[in-house]
Structures are given as structure tokens and as C-alpha cells.
Amino acid sequence: MIGSFEDLEAFKRAYRLSLEIHRVSLDWPGEEQYGLADQARRSSKSICANLAEGWGKQAHSRREFNRFIYMAIGSCEEMRVWSRYCYDFGYIDEAIWLRWSDAYRQIAKMLQGLSGRVLRSGSDP
């Protein structure tokens, strides 16, 4: 039973990954702390925040919830780009880059499925 956004597996995975990215990015060079590190931290957290905000609005509008799901999907794709930059600049190794990229691809697929369920659940109240 899903009683909260925190019960969504996509949220759980995205949240764990955002914590990891935050911790790892703290060790990146100082000149990146307000650049790539900050961008990666914000993008990874926005997935979770969009799910929470959309969840809160679903009682009023399923379409609005769906819009927030798609913003979260966009942030997953954005994180795949930032992860690639992190790898190319040497801040993470190839194994981490591939793991992060795959994880965000999986989360995006989960969110696509969630979107389909939201839309099939009926019209707005």
C-alpha cells in the first residue's frame, strides 16, 4: 500500500542516490563546489522534491501530479549528463559513473510506469 511519496520505490532509490552524490561531491575541488558539485546535488534532490510536491497535489489534480513526475524524469536525465561530466573531469571513476547512469535510467523507467498508473487512475476529483 502506498500511503506517502516516501513509500514509492522510485523515491527511495532517488533519495539514497542523492545522499551518495551529496557526500561524494563534498570531496570535489573547491572551484566545483558552486558549479558542477552544486548542480549535481540540486538535480539529484529535485527528483525527490518533485515527487513529494506532486504527491501533495494529487488530491486536487492527477494531471498536476503527472506533471511533477515528468519533471522528476527530466531531472533523472539531467543527472545522467552531470554524472558524465563528473566522470570526464575525473571526479568519479568509470564504475561509479556507470552505476549512477544506470540507476537514473531505472528510476526514470519506474517514474514512467508511475505516470501511466496515475493517468489510468481516473479523472481529477
Image (cartoon, helix red, strand yellow):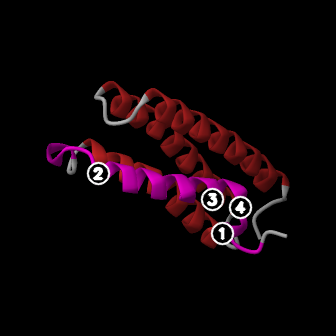
Residue 74, relative to residue 61: is it above or below? above
The residue identified by callout 4 is 8
The residue under the point 67% across, 53% down is 10
Q: Describe the element under mark 1 as helix, strand or loop.
A: helix
Distance from label 4 to label 2 (Cα)?
26 Å
User: Which of marks 2 and 1 precedes in the sequence?
Assistant: 1
Whether pointer 3 and pointer 1 mark residues with C-beta atoms closer than 8 Å, the reply is yes
Magenta-highlighted residues: 3-32
Residue type at the position of mark 3? Phe
Helix, strand or loop for the magenta stretch, by majority: helix
The residue identified by callout 1 is 6
Q: Describe the element under mark 3 as helix, strand or loop.
A: helix
Residue type at the position of mark 4? Leu
Residue 65 screen position, x and y as percent: 64, 60
Whether pointer 1 and pointer 4 mark residues with C-beta atoms closer than 8 Å, the reply is yes
User: Which of marks 1 and 3 precedes in the sequence?
Assistant: 1
User: Which of marks 3 and 2 precedes in the sequence?
Assistant: 3
The residue identified by callout 2 is 38
Q: Describe the element under mark 4 as helix, strand or loop.
A: loop
Residue 3 screen position, x and y as percent: 76, 74
The residue identified by callout 3 is 11
Residue type at the position of mark 1? Glu
Query: Is residue 11 magenta-colored?
Result: yes
Q: Describe the element under mark 2 as helix, strand or loop.
A: helix
Residue 45, relative to residue 92: is it above or below? below
